[in-house]
Image (cartoon, coloured by chain):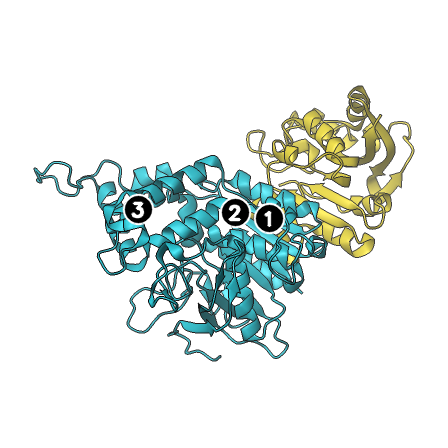
Chain colours: A cyan, B yellow
Amino acid sequence: MSHNPTFVETEVLSVERPFRFESGDILPRIDIAYETYGQLNERRDNAVLIEHALSGDAHAAFYHKGDRKPGWWDCMIGPGKAFDTDRYFVICSNVIGGCRGTSGPSSINPATGRPYGLTFPPISIRDMVEVQRILLKHLGIDRLKCIAGGSMGGMQTLQFFCDYPFQFESFICIASSMKHSAQQIAFNEVGRRAIMADPRWNNGNYYDDVPPEGGLSVARMIGHITYLSEKMMQEKFGRLKKDKESRAIFRPSFEVEHYLDYQGISFVKRFDANSYLYITNAIDNFDLKTSLSSRDRFRGEGRQRGAHLDDMRGKRGLVISFSSDWLYPPSQSKEIVQFFSAFNVRVSYTEIATEHGHDAFLTDYTRPSEIIWGFLSSLS
Amino acid sequence: MYKIPAQTYPIIQEWIAHGSRVLDLGCGDGSLLKTLAGTKQVEGIGVEISEEMILKCISKGICVYQADIDKDLSEWDDGSFDYVVLNATLQVITRPYRVIEEMLRVGRFAIISISNFGYARNRLRVLAQGRVSSSARISGGWHDTPVLRYVSLKEFISSIREIGVEIMDARYIFPFNVVSSTRWPLYNLLAKEGIFRLRRT
């Protein structure tokens, strides 16, 4: 498990046994794509699990050979950084239902030899957690120093921590929520509709043809509007026009249009439209409190979910929000703090002043790094 | 900035029962909670607004909640804490009555320490220099000092009763670290600080 300090590769764990989803559906086998950074110590107690957001993947830090850009959270993970790879063994895996190496709707169904498409079972945040448990078992890690993630990564963090608190010393939840509000669901639904309204989507059967790039890029454009604050957008683009001379009507001319266009186009190159539908559906259906009070008839260890909540007592938590994040507003983070405080989890909360909106969880790293560094250092 | 009087720590420790849940409003660098965690095994949460202090608390393993205590106490349920502490912070609060009421809603008991503006030296300073905002514990000018409330022990004691709050215990801190639990004559002139344990009547 040693790594070149600069270059990393995504590894794939093939799980050749059935995986049962929360829905009750079963897949005969799954793949789990993951990366690790740093070294697991002899006591095997310095592992930190990183959870990615909607469009993220297992490649959280360092570089893939030939790439110009590092992993999605490279500003936070590395030697001397917030998640210090000189001290911690950092793990990140792609979520189930994704399209970046872990099984998802674009994976091949061994029974048919064709991509699953919409025959892939519906996924939940808890399914993402259960898949990661398989990975942790494979890596021989039972106890982790911390689990951390932002946005959807925060949801996985909360679910994992609540379902299996005895596996973690602490959690860090950034710009996230215990459940989506109507507004958050609404934005996701518009994104999904954009994909499904694209004739190329074809009920999810597009893998032999051109994918629904138009729909997916519109979904991504909507996403990006919600990731930025109004003020930041105004300062960054205002009413600037890129192509003042163009006489073509309804072609992108404002800077902000070009920006969204670029975000949409670059997204379709790396993301599967069906995965977008599956994952946003999982996010919208996530409801931490409800999930802890309902029975799960299917899996063994946590037969009754919420059974281990009392084990959370005395554990440490850190909840971070960003002042201008209107997609996952600070009020939702405060609810998380209150929820865990009621279980006697020692939770700290900080709201970071920024103009960068929800995007801040990926871009603003100075202050979060100080806080996370301090938090992790204060653990036993 | 306002100096935190450490003389109040032993008194607070004496009042707080072993293993209680404590909310420390304006907890600064978390040193009171750290002390209480060590000596009384309390489960403590600090509330602080300063980013610098938040980082200090988190780095010490102190549980801290970034909030403006003038606004944000409503998030805690009734009776979430045994003690809610306001140590040397009352003077910087915009709506003190509201905060005291909230303290006694989320906590069973409140502990409040205040610097006595009626203390002889403060009176002399005002008298001699004619300057209101420069007292021993206050830095900055009238326009930028964080201290908004100039209150004497006597005023505090009489007003707190009016809002239905009972003083269960009090300590008056005089010069040379003389601490008394009885209200000596001239206490409002001679005591530097007072600290009170309060509950609803």
In contact (CB < 8 Å): disc 1 and disc 2: yes
- Kindly identify which chain the residue marked by label 2 belongs to: A
Element on which disc 3 rests: helix
Tell me what residue is drawn at x 54 percent, y 74 percent.
A138
- Kindly identify which chain the residue marked by label 3 belongs to: A
Is B146 placed left or right of A208 in the picture? right
Element on which disc 2 rests: loop
Residue A286 disc label: 2
Q: Mark 1 points at which residue?
A: A291
> Dot 1 surroundings within 10 Å: few (below 14), some, or many (20 or more)?
some
The CA distance from mark 3 to mark 2 is: 21 Å
Residue A195 disc label: 3
Q: Which of A110 and A154 is in front in this view?
A: A110
Query: Are the residues under badges 3 and 2 in a single subunit?
Result: yes
The residue at the far front in this view is A111
Is B116 placed left or right of B167 in the picture? left
Q: Which residue type carries mark 3?
A: Ile
Does A44 appear above or below B148?
below
**Residue A326 position in % (x across, y down):** 44, 38
> Dot 3 surroundings within 10 Å: few (below 14), some, or many (20 or more)?
many
Tell me what residue is drawn at x 42 percent, y 64 percent.
A103
